[in-house]
Image: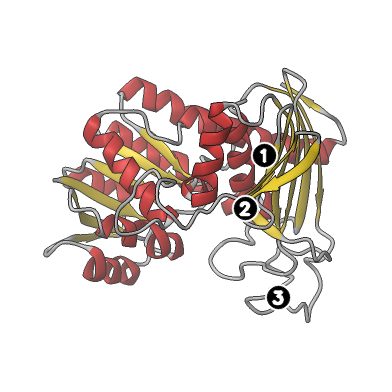
């Protein structure tokens, strides 16, 4: 029985991590930590084993508990500090996305994982959707040929998160680019199986953050608290010449919305996620479009009671620890995502292309 500690008992822990772990019989959540003690107590009562302990300090939790795994579900700024402390305390770590607020911190996390020999993975659960798992298998089989152009989509018209620290640049490091753009970029790089970046050019905008009466999904935001971008875009060139366009927004005057999606163009075929999963190619002299039936089995990494991406992510992560295998989301891959995100911010700030 693997003993798990949760650090950060807010929205993502309650919405994804803890409900998914609760379904896995080989684990038990024995410790819960949050700077707001009531949140940790509520989580312990709902998801913990009988007698689960509650902490306000993750340092105290790591000192007093004998844990196998720690899930880090805190603001981006503290990802590295807590993950490193957990690995140095002999724990495997699942850290929420993005890997870290900065590349410097992400590198420290990867170095610690290598030094300690502990497993480290990052919470990119969209890899585990039915569409993504099927598409990745098709890409690995070579159905698309050489993928030389792609788009990573993370566009919202008006869906700015108004709770927590999402609007706080100091805590998060950015807005939609680092929040949802990171998911779309991870998906795209994973499908291409290409992590060798040559250069990045980016544009970051805060054009709507000062507005009121916005029609925002979660109610108007406070312009005084809005210290991040409302949209960001990147042009990424890989070492082999392949090109990726990344588009992200929380607030943008567009009807072309959708997030955690990718469009891939290869030498044999193309694929996108705009209307379910679609493949396109020329066949027998005609242009064709096909849509796989993903309602049947055989597409998820974990086929059990649920094919919810969060459940699949948790199941495969626990399996990696139990069987001593590599996690599906490797820290080396997540590091490249963070490098690209930081380069887009720096490129926009300096007006220059960032060469790797």
**Residue 291, image x, y percentages:** 62, 51
In the image shown, does 82 or 119 lie closer to the viewer?
Answer: 119
Decide if residue 134 is on the left or right side of residue 227.
Answer: left
Mark sitting on residue 49: none
- Estimate how packed mark 2 is, as few (under 14), some (14 to 19) or many (20 or more) residues with alpha carbons within 10 Å: many
Residue bearing mark 2: 180
Quadrant in the picture for residue 6: bottom left
* Mark 2 secondary-structure assignment: helix
Mark sitting on residue 341: 1
Counting residues from the N terminus, which is met first, the one under dot 2 or under dot 3? 2
* Mark 3 secondary-structure assignment: loop
In the image shown, does 245 or 272 lie closer to the viewer?
Answer: 272
Instruction: Find the residue positioned furthest to the front.
Output: 284
Report the residue at 22% width, 70% height from top.
45
Query: Please, is residue 198 above or below residue 327 in the view?
Result: above
In this rendering, the label closer to the viewer, 2 or 1? 2
Mark sitting on residue 216: 3
Quadrant in the picture for residue 116: top left
**Residue 324, image x, y percentages:** 26, 28
Decide if residue 324 is on the left or right side of residue 291.
Answer: left
* Quadrant into which the C terminus falls: top right
Quadrant in the picture for residue 202: top right
In the image shown, does 219 or 127 lie closer to the viewer?
Answer: 127
Report the residue at 54% width, 45% height from top.
132
């Amino acid at each position: 029985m693997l003993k798990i500690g949760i650090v950060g008992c807010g929205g993502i822990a309650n919405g994804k991590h803890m409900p998914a772990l609760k379904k896995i019989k080989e684990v038990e959540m024995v410790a819960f930590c949050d700077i707001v003690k009531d949140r940790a107590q509520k989580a312990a009562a709902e998801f913990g084993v009988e007698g689960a302990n509650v902490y306000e300090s993750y340092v105290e939790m790591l000192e007093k508990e004998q844990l196998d795994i720690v899930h880090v579900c805190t603001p981006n700024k503290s990802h590295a500090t807590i993950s490193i402390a957990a690995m140095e305390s002999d724990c495997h770590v699942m850290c929420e996305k993005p890997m870290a607020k900065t590349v410097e911190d992400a590198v420290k996390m990867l170095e610690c994982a290598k030094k300690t020999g502990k497993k480290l993975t990052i919470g990119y659960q969209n890899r585990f959707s039915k569409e993504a798992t099927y598409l990745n298998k098709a890409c690995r089989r070579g159905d698309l040929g050489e993928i030389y152009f792609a788009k990573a989509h993370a566009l919202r018209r008006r869906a700015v998160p108004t709770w927590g620290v999402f609007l706080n640049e100091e805590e998060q490091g950015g807005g939609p680019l680092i929040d949802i753009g990171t998911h779309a970029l991870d998906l795209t790089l994973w499908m291409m199986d290409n992590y060798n970046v040559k250069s990045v050019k980016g544009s970051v905008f805060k054009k709507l953050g000062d507005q009121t009466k916005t029609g925002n999904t979660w109610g108007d935001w406070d312009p005084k608290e809005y210290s991040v971008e409302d949209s960001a875009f990147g042009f990424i060139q890989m070492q082999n010449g392949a090109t990726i366009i990344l588009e992200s927004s929380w607030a943008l005057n567009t009807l072309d919305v959708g997030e955690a999606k990718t469009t891939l163009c290869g030498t044999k075929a193309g694929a996108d996620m705009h209307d379910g999963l679609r493949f396109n190619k020329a066949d027998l002299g005609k242009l064709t479009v096909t849509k796989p039936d993903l309602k049947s089995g055989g597409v998820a990494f974990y086929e059990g009671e649920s094919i919810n991406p969060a459940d699949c992510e948790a199941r495969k992560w626990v399996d990696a620890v139990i069987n001593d295998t590599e996690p599906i989301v490797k820290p080396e891959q997540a590091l490249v995502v963070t490098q690209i995100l930081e380069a887009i911010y720096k490129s926009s700030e300096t007006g220059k292309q960032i060469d790797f």
